[in-house]
Structures are given as structure tokens and as C-alpha cells.
Amino acid sequence: MAYLNNTFASMIKDELEKSIETKKLVIERSIPLLNEIAHVMIEGMRNGNKLLIFGNGGSAADSQHMAAEFVGKFNMVRKALPALALTTDTSILTSISNDDAFENVFARQIEALGRASDIALGISTSGNSPNVIKGIVQAGEMGLVTIGFTGQDGGKIKHVADYCFRAPSDHTARIQEVHITVAHALCGIVEEELCSAPEKILNGGQDLS
């Protein structure tokens, strides 16, 4: 067993405690809003609409993570739920960036793939990513329901999204930790509401991932 470095141990403990405190603030401040967002996703998917998710960097990874949970499975074996991350097709991303502008990489995909009453979820820790803002604006103009996940300030996204969940921190890591925790909660709620079935497998069951 490796020698326990007390400095490292203290740093790890500090990071975990900060993450816990930030999530406690979400419980205090944001449950009603997240409840609304859960209802939007449930009713949208129940009516045959899809979820389009997008962001940059770590938020791009979160977009793909969230889409994978909906399309694959989260807590149960069930039918696939319609979600798509707009961050995965390198040919589309690079052609739009090269031939048009990087700030249009999500708006252009939403123009092609989005339909009225679909749901667009843009993730930006600052709330000010130009391509995420343009994606949300494009979605709103087309009649999609728009949701933003941001940090505590909300940035410009809070002014253009129908719903804006603001993680209560200015620290990028804390914001991202909250975003993925909330994404997991929403996925669990949606699949429980839409897909409860006898073949349900909870976390303690077999996981083939």
C-alpha cells in the first residue's frame, strides 16, 4: 500500500467537502426548478419529442454522457429514450467551423435536426459560450423548449433560455459536478416515469458497461 501523503489526503477531502456543500445549495435553492425541468422532459418524450444536448469541452463530455444514459439505460433495462448530443460528429463540427463559424456549430445542427416541441439543452459553465447561446436562440426561434445549465451567474443564457438551472458556484469543477449529478437525477426520473416495467434492473443488478 502506498504511503499516505497527508497533504494529498487533505486536498482530496477538501475537494469532496466543497462538492458536497455545493450540492447542498442545489437542494436548498433549485428543487422546484429541477422539478419543472423533469416535467418538461417527461411530457416532451411522452409526446414523441427528442432531447438535443450541447456544450463545449467538459460540457461536451457531459452532453454525450447524458445522451448515453437516455439512449442506453440508467437504472433499468427499458426502451431507448430519444436524446442526441450535438458534440460527436467531427465532420459536421469541423465543416461548420471551417466553412462558416465555430459559433454556429450547434445552431446549424438544431436547424437541421430540431422540430417544434423538441427540447434543447445547452450547457455552459459560464453561461456565455457564444455557440451555446446561438444554439439556444435558434432552438427558441424554431419552437423548441430551451433549457440552460450554467454556473451561478447564469450569464447571457439566463436571458434566452426558457429554463435556466444555475449551479451555485463560480468554480468550473464544482459546476460540472453539479451538472452531471442533476443530469443523472433527471434521467432517473424520466425513465422511471416513462419506462417502469417488470424487467427493471436497479443499480445493484447486472451492469454490462
Image (spheres, rainbow, N blue to C red):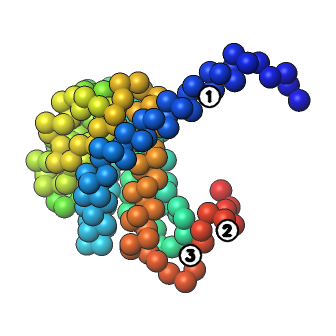
Q: Please state which of residues 73 and 201 is positioned toward the viewer in this rendering.
A: 201
Q: Determine the residue located farthest toward the top in the rendered image.
A: 7
Image location (x, y in percent) of residue 7: 69, 16
50 in relation to 175, above or below: below
Q: Label 1 belongs to which residue?
A: 13
Q: Label 3 belongs to which residue?
A: 200
Q: Label 2 belongs to which residue?
A: 205
- At label 3, the amino acid type is Lys
Residue 99 is at least partly visible in this image:
no
Q: Is residue 199 left or right of residue 48?
A: right
Mark 1 residue element: helix
Quadrant showing the N terminus: top right
57 in relation to 162, above or below: above
- At label 2, the amino acid type is Gly
Of labels 1 and 3, the one closer to you: 1
Task: Give the quadrant of residue 123.
Answer: top left
Q: Earlier in the sequence, mark 3 or mark 2?
A: 3
Image location (x, y in percent) of residue 165: 28, 43
| Cα distance in 3D space between marks 3 and 2 | 9 Å
Quadrant showing the C terminus: bottom right
Q: Please state which of residues 170 and 136 is positioned toward the viewer in this rendering.
A: 170
66 in relation to 169, above or below: below
